[in-house]
Image: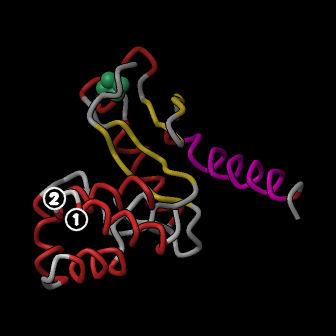
Amino acid sequence: MTIEEFATKVKQIRSKNGTKLMCLQEAQSGFGYVSKEAMKIIADEFDTTTSEIYSIATFYSQFTFVKKGKYVITVCLGTACYVKGSAKVLEKFEQILGIKLGQTTDDGMFTLASARCVGCCGLAPVTMINGKVFTITPDQVQETIDAIIEHDKKQNGGNK
Ligand code: FES
């Protein structure tokens, strides 16, 4: 979705007596996050301020304000995974990628997230990469990152 298409959606929502919250949901699902630009569009349409829109958005945990990386690495910190050392896995990802939980690398490649049990405790310690489940121990973190970078290069190689 382009920002222009989003602006049109916001107008449509407003004209059908929709809410600011609905517009925020539209931004989140369309862009994967709520940008300042999107909040400004909503604010203008509803004759209010960007800070009011921001305060609505921050009330709900479903909204994020930073664009996610191409690869979202989610380390499970649920009990079964924690017992099997997932905190160390997370620590290792943070150390190697140079970011903290919830952050994205400057090149937009990686976002580090956590979850509380993703429903496959038998595979603990579990890490999801873009929704796919893997068993990754602290010792395997570096090779996992290398494999992702390698995979990404191959994918892009075909498109250049
Ligand atoms: S605790 Fe990690 S999958 Fe259940």
**Kind of residue sitting beneath label 2:** Asn
Residue designated by label 1: 14
Crowding at mark 1 (Cα within 10 Å: few <14, some 14-19, many 20+) = some
Q: Which residues are magenta?
A: 139-156
- Give the image location of residue 134, x and y in percent: 54, 30
Q: Is residue 48 left or right of residue 106?
A: left
Q: Is residue 26 left or right of residue 104?
A: left
> Is residue 155 on the magenta stretch?
yes
Residue designated by label 2: 17
**Kind of residue sitting beneath label 1:** Arg
Of all residues shown, which one is farthest toward the front?
15
- Give the image location of residue 105, x and y in percent: 51, 69
Q: Is residue 101 visible?
A: no
Q: Residue at x 19, y 53 (%)?
A: 61
**Element on which disc 1 rests:** helix
**Element on which disc 2 rests:** loop
Q: Residue at x 28, y 55 (%)?
A: 25
Task: Identify the image quadrant of residue 121.
Answer: top left
Q: Quadrant of ligand 1?
A: top left
- Give the image location of residue 126, x and y in percent: 44, 30
Identify the image's colour scheme: rainbow, by chain, secondary structure or one colour: secondary structure
Distance in Å between CA atoms under marks 2 and 1: 5 Å
Q: Is residue 4 left or right of residue 151?
A: left
**Image vertical order of residue 136 relative to residue 80, above or below:** below
Q: Residue at x 37, y 51 (%)?
A: 113
Q: Is residue 127 visible?
A: yes
Question: Main SS type for the magenta part?
Answer: helix
Q: Are marks 2 and 1 in contact (CB under 8 Å)?
A: yes
